[in-house]
């Protein structure tokens, strides 16, 4: 069977959708489970998957139902790619650059530090052959990707101490996702790839020294 995946593009979070598992098939309707990499408190990012599911339900006349599950409910936040790939879950909503350790190409479909901004990413995806190029890549993982949102530019982060020079980055345990962590690592910091729902506790317990997420609205939702 073909597995499908919906991945959000452009510094974004994405939706992956895998093949239909027999256990969730009914004669009169299709029912999929979607695993998110984001906590339910993030109504914009997590909510994007809910909006997607609502639209699918509407255009199918209620014949295609997708249940959305927050990070950790069905599986850990960063396990969604492997589970979609294996077909143990039908869909996932995540950010592709989380998986750049598997292959750095994942970051191209999401966001690269000092790379394309949100408008440029959208232009490349839809008008510059980007979607086709990324689908050729995802085919090797038995996944089909779809653009599903765009977070725009992200903030520099939150720090326990003031950063006055590059020397202050040395040894700094910095929560930063995926490919961006390699950039931070070149500055001497120690990148930590934590899911959104775990960041505040890590800061509170001082197991990390700094963190970035997205921007004011979502950062406030996480308590930063």
Image: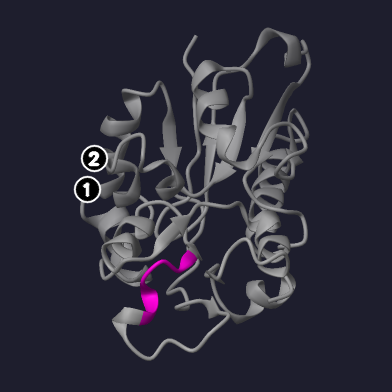
Left or right, 209 with respect to 11, comes to: right
- What's the coloring here? one colour
**Element type where label 1 sits in the image:** loop
**Residue at the spot of label 2:** 133
Q: Residue furthest left?
A: 128
Q: Label 2: how many residues lie within 10 Å, few (<14), some (14-19) or many (20+)?
A: few
At horizontal 76% and vertical 55% (from top left) the residue drawn is 40
> Of residues 58 and 1, which is closer to you in this image?
1
Residue 122 falls within the magenta-colored stretch: no
Instruction: Please tell me whether mark 1 or mark 2 is closer to you in this view.
Output: 2
> Of residues 86 and 176, which is closer to you in this image?
176
State which region is magenta.
168-173
> Of residues 77 and 50, which is closer to you in this image?
77
In percent of width and height, residue 89 lies at 64, 24
Left or right, 178 with respect to 26, comes to: left
Examine the rendered structure and indicate whether residue 165 appears above or below residue 179: below
Q: Label 1: how many residues lie within 10 Å, few (<14), some (14-19) or many (20+)?
A: few
In percent of width and height, residue 184 lies at 34, 65
**Mark count:** 2
Q: Are marks 1 and 2 in contact (CB under 8 Å)?
A: yes
């Amino acid at each position: 069977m073909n597995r499908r995946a919906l991945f959000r593009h452009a510094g974004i979070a994405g939706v992956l959708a895998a093949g239909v598992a027999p256990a969730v098939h009914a004669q009169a309707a299709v029912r999929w489970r979607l695993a998110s990499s984001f906590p339910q408190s993030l109504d914009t990012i997590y909510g994007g998957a809910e909006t997607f599911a609502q639209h699918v339900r509407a255009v199918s006349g209620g014949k295609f139902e997708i249940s959305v599950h927050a990070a950790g409910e069905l599986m850990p936040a960063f396990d969604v790619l492997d589970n979609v790939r294996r077909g143990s879950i039908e869909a996932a909503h995540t950010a592709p650059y989380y998986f750049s350790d598997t292959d750095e190409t994942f970051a191209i479909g999401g966001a690269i530090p000092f790379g394309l901004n949100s408008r440029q990413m959208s232009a490349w995806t839809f008008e510059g052959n980007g979607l086709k190029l990324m689908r050729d890549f995802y085919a090797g993982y038995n996944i089909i990707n779809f653009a599903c949102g765009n977070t725009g530019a992200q903030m520099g982060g939150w720090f326990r101490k003031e950063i006055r020079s590059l020397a202050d980055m040395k040894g700094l345990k910095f929560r930063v996702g995926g490919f961006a962590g390699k950039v931070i690592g070149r500055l001497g910091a120690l990148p930590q790839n934590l899911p959104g729902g775990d960041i505040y506790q890590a800061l509170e317990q001082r197991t990390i020294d700094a963190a970035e997420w997205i921007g004011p609205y979502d950062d406030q939702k996480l308590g930063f």
